[in-house]
Image (cartoon, coloured by chain):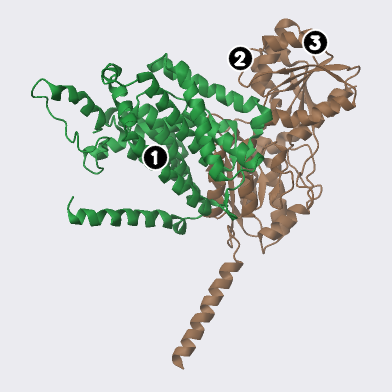
Chain colours: A brown, B green
Amino acid sequence: MKSAMRNSILAAALLAGVSSAALAEPGVTDDKIRIGTFGPLTGPVSIYGYPIINGAVAVYNEINAKGGIHGRKIEMVYEDDACDAAKTRAAVKKLVHSSDVFAIHGGTCSSAVNAARDEIIASEVPYMVMAMVLDSITSPVAKNMFTTTQTGTLDGVTMVNFVKSIPDVKKVVIVKNTDDWADSHLSTIYPGLKEAGIEVAADIVLERNASDATTQALHSLEANADAVILVTYPNETAVFLREAKKYGLKGPFVGASSQMDMLAVADRAGGIDAISELYVSSYLLEPVDGEKMKEFSELYAKHFPNDKLQTLSFYGMSGAYAFVDALERAGPDLTREGFINALESTSDGFAGPAYCKISFSPENHQGCTEGHIWAVRDGKVVAIGETWPQ
Amino acid sequence: MDRTAIMKKPLIYGGLAAALLAVPLLTNGYTQYVVNLVTVYVVLGVGLNILLGYAGQFAFANAAFMGIGAYITAILSSQLGLPFWVCIPAAGVVTALIGTACAVPAMRMASIYLALVTFAFAELMVWVFINWKGVTNGSNGIGVSAPDLFGYVFRGDQRLYYLLLPCCLTMLWLASRILKSYIGRSFVIIRESEIVARCNGIDVSRTKMIAFGLSAFFGGVGGALFAYTVGLVLPQSFGLFQLVIHIAIVVLGGMASLAGAIIGALLLTTLPEFLRDFQSLQEVMFGTALVIVAIFMPRGIAGALTRFGILPREMLVRGIVRERRPVATPGRDQDLEPIGVGVTHD
């Protein structure tokens, strides 16, 4: 009898333990929510690592400083992916299987993260893109993957809409890099131009890390186009604009959001004059020193006083605000399912320094779709709207 | 061989096989993925070791061979729907043919010039992977579907391990057989002295081409296994950094040693994972390790372990030259000595 009772108590205790273990959500305790992040923290592209991630961390740190969310503070777990496909898979697997995170907010290299996409989907861990632009990350929609970053195709739409608004544009030159990032932009630029009846007079490739663009500049000059579209990274943009100035090639030059740090492009292109006719697509409210960015610049500087403030510093903030908002709305009994439902019900949410309101739905996990144009006015980079200034 | 030794051998091999088969029981998704990468890099390390370590050719096209194998696998499996038992050998054979073709111009060069030409070939291949969009899908890469055998899909890292492990062991066995054959011994003689090789009736050019082809074959198979492991083949995966990993595996593990390739792959794959939390230390540690190995262990960790009696000597010719002997008298023995130096790696 005694032993039967003891066995019953043991069984009950065991069941209670099992059921509480089953109920416990990974990465969530009474006072903490563990969020994983990954990016190129080392290696040649580490410029897209901490500078971007720290923007998001600044938002989370600020929330922690205010007491956290439903009494829980956010704890970050960092993993390095070095922008390499194999390492990115390892980083995601480690966060999911070893670090036991509740959600992931990370990834700044499109191709590398694409290699881990199936792993993220299979894990069912809620995932927010940190700063990638490849459409295939969030399309087709996966239940647990979200982004607030402007994708390449949407960036292309902003660019082509601006080109269409330039008075009397009949033909353009396209100078492009050749990779997935450039392809995603061009997938909307070409149809947009065709629809508007704008001819592509020359379609010119500029290789990555090119140190000279004489051929491309002369070819563009020969095409005698009304505008030049630059689907290029900052370094190649600077090289092209330097040669354009040298050979008297006139703009307007319409660039992708990769060139948002316009003053850095100017430095490499040989001065502010070289970018006087450059118009760049942007998904941020304003340049770093803009009035509307002050709140976010101060937030970043408060938590990372030794970091240099740059446009990269704001890339990850909108996703962090979306995460925080959904964590609040998911309530104190936090589950992954509840959190994903909360994310999917986000409507016109606060996007921090991003030029949009965040909206998700079960059919749409692309939170931001709007972009606008930046240009240089009186030696300063300013936002000029979505169309050619009147 | 005494009776105890005869009984011991199957026990050791049996225990080792059981331990290897039991690995997925002890791992989670992450650690199993790292183990899987080790098996892939063992094959790649062996491939480069054949050319660099055994044949002494300063050729640096291994990352390109790996890429070719990976792309062939991705195209055959995902676009043509062929099974893995066709894709993996096809990746090896086609890459071997390309590797052999590469050897033709490379035969006219030696040392640093050969290194430059093969390095240029590797860079050219990355350019091809990016720009031959109709075949390679450019920078977007090609997804690789999980391999299956009669309806059993090797999906997930634990299952995939049971495909990678036999492949890796088969490649190790194959390498061991080749290196212990006439061809393998010819590689070593060519490395030591081409003149001596010619004097011994070895066709140096032909043998070098075989070394290139074999190395490419292993690189191609390694690439195929890599494609199945990572699931997405991207051009950026086969650049300079990949090559540096391969060279480090061979140099740190041990030149001209199969055990060295295993040790190197194990170290170079697992250490960066252990050091994930000490990122700033990683590069310093690898740099220091390479310098230390280059100065104090010219034959790598495997060579040092052999010297201390921890690892047995790898003998390409069993029973002929067990110990280095001082050449006491001129004549026949003197002629054998250079061959003896070549076939033992201590």
Q: Which mark is residue B216?
A: none
Chain holding disc 3:
A
Q: Residue furthest front?
A: B201
Say if residue B1 shows up in the picture.
Answer: yes
Q: Relative to B98, does residue A321 appear above or below in the rendering?
A: below
Please, which chain is the residue tagged with disc 1 on?
A: B
Q: Quadrant of residue A72?
A: bottom right
Dot 2 crowding, Cα within 10 Å, few <14, some 14–19, many 20+: few
Query: To which quarter of the image does residue A353 belong?
Result: top right
**In which quadrant will I find the C terminus of chain A?**
top right
Q: Nearer the viewer, residue A251 or A221?
A: A221
Q: On the picture, is A5 further left or further right than A375?
A: left
Give the amino acid type for the residue marked by disc 3 in the picture. Ala
Classify mark 3: helix, strand or loop: helix
Pick out the residue farthest to the bottom: A1
* Image location of residue B145, percent across then percent down: 62, 45
The structure residue drawn at horizontal position 11% and vertical position 27%, both measured from the top left corner, is: B326
Q: Earlier in the sequence, mark 3 or mark 2?
A: 2
Residue under disc 3 on the same chain as residue under disc 1: no
Q: Residue at x 77, y 8 (%)?
A: A221
Q: CA distance from mark 3 to mark 1?
A: 59 Å
The residue depicted at 90 percent of the width and 25 percent of the height is A196
As displayed, is residue B184 above or below residue B30? Answer: above
Question: Which amino acid type corresponds to the residue marked 1 in the rendered image?
Answer: Leu
Expressed as whole percent of the image width and height from the top left, the position of residue B253 reads 35, 36
The percent coordinates of residue B142 (x first, y second) are: 64, 37
Q: Which residue is mark 1?
A: B174
Which label sits on residue A211?
A: 2
Reading the image, the residue beneath label 3 is A223
Q: How many marks?
A: 3
Left or right placement of residue B345 versus residue A83 in this view: left
Tell me: residue B143, above or below residue A142: above
